[in-house]
Amino acid sequence: MISGYHAQVALPGYGAIKAYLELFYQGGRCEHYVELMRVFPEVRRCSGISGETDMLVSIEAASMLRLSEIRGEIENFPGMQKVKTHMVVKDWVF
């Protein structure tokens, strides 16, 4: 006899694969690459930063496969020289 059941719904941001992509590109402006990123709903933030790295991109994907697909598409953007992936192991929220 089944006495009941319930749905277990994950809160936004929980259960997702989180990563930062470090982008290195030749020429172009950050704004150009930000516009290209808008096609990915998984992209949470793009930050133009100082130093050797041109941009840092925060991603929350449903799976490693989806993260890999997004990374592959970004690698093929015109002028993209290198993409480094940094997986988020733990977040501290203040």
Image: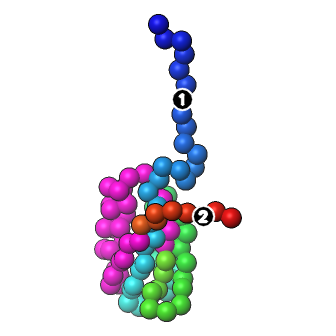
CB under 8 Å between callouts 1 and 2?
no
Residue type at mark 2 is: Trp
Using the rendered image of the protein, determine whether residue 32 is visible from the camera's viewpoint. no
Residue type at mark 1 is: Ala
Secondary structure beneath label 1:
loop
Above or below, 89 against 46 in this view is: above
Using the rendered image of the protein, determine whether residue 27 is visible from the camera's viewpoint. yes
Q: Residue 44 at what x, y percent from top left?
A: 54, 64
| Residue bounds of the magenta highlight | 57-86
Q: Residue 49 at what x, y percent from top left?
A: 54, 85
Above or below, 69 against 14 in this view is: below
Residue at which label 2 appears: 92
Quarter of the picture holding the C terminus: bottom right
Q: What residue do we see at 44% from left, 91% from top?
A: 52
Toward the viewer: 92 or 45?
92
Q: What residue do we see at 33% from left, 62% from top?
A: 68
Q: Which quarter of the figure has residue 40?
A: bottom left
Q: Does the segment drawn in magenta span residue 63? A: yes
Which residue is the extreme one toward the right?
Answer: 94
Q: Residue 36 at what x, y percent from top left?
A: 45, 71
Toward the viewer: 2 or 32?
2
Toward the viewer: 88 or 65?
88
Distance from label 1 to label 2 (Cα)? 27 Å
Residue at which label 1 appears: 7
